[in-house]
Amino acid sequence: MDQRISVITLGVAELARSRQFYEDGLGWIRGNTEDEIAFYQVGGMVLALFSRAALAADAKLESEGTGFAGIALAYNVASREEVDAVLAEGHDPQGGRGGVLGRLFRLFRRS
């Protein structure tokens, strides 16, 4: 079996808001037209956004839960300069660094 990941699906609370973040905030291009799921080609794999409730139902699990979900996604760069360049590329469709994109910016850590 090849070592690879084809699709990572995130169960999100608000699909429209999450799409706004990836499309308007990061400038990603959606690869499908269906309303209930969004696919984004990311290098050799796909990131999918699906409602948390629908993803849980698909897995035959409860959608409600608290605490750490056991997943983290990362975008690694080689230098501090690249961190600044990546942050400069992202923009908040509502202006400034507030809203959804602002919360993402606060997650970035510089070492």
Image (cartoon, helix red, strand yellow):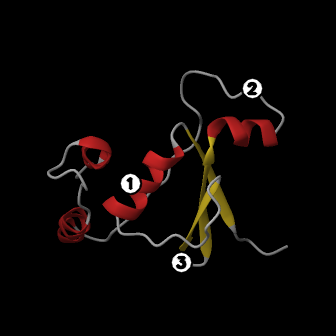
Q: Which residue does the numbered mark 3 point to in the structure image?
A: 43
Q: Which residue does the numbered mark 2 point to in the structure image?
A: 62
Residue 61 coordinates in the image, percent (x, y):
79, 30
Q: Nearer the viewer, residue 23 or 97?
A: 23
How far apart marks 1 and 3 lie (CA) works out to 19 Å
Question: Which residue is painted at 22% across and 50% down in the image?
Answer: 94
Quarter the N terminus occupies = bottom right
Label 3 packing within 10 angstroms: few (<14), some (14-19), many (20+): few
Label 1 packing within 10 angstroms: few (<14), some (14-19), many (20+): many
Q: Which residue does the numbered mark 1 point to in the structure image?
A: 21
Q: Amino acid at mark 2?
A: Glu
Q: Amino acid at mark 3?
A: Gly
71 up-or-down from 91: above or below: above
Looking at the image, can residue 5 be seen?
no
- Assign a secondary structure to mark 2: loop
Question: Which residue is painted at 62% across and 72% down in the image?
Answer: 45
Kindly indicate the quadrant of the structure image that contains residue 59: top right
57 with respect to 76 (left or right): right
Q: Amino acid at mark 1?
A: Phe
Q: Which of labels 3 and 2 is toward the front?
A: 2
Q: Which mark is residue 87?
A: none
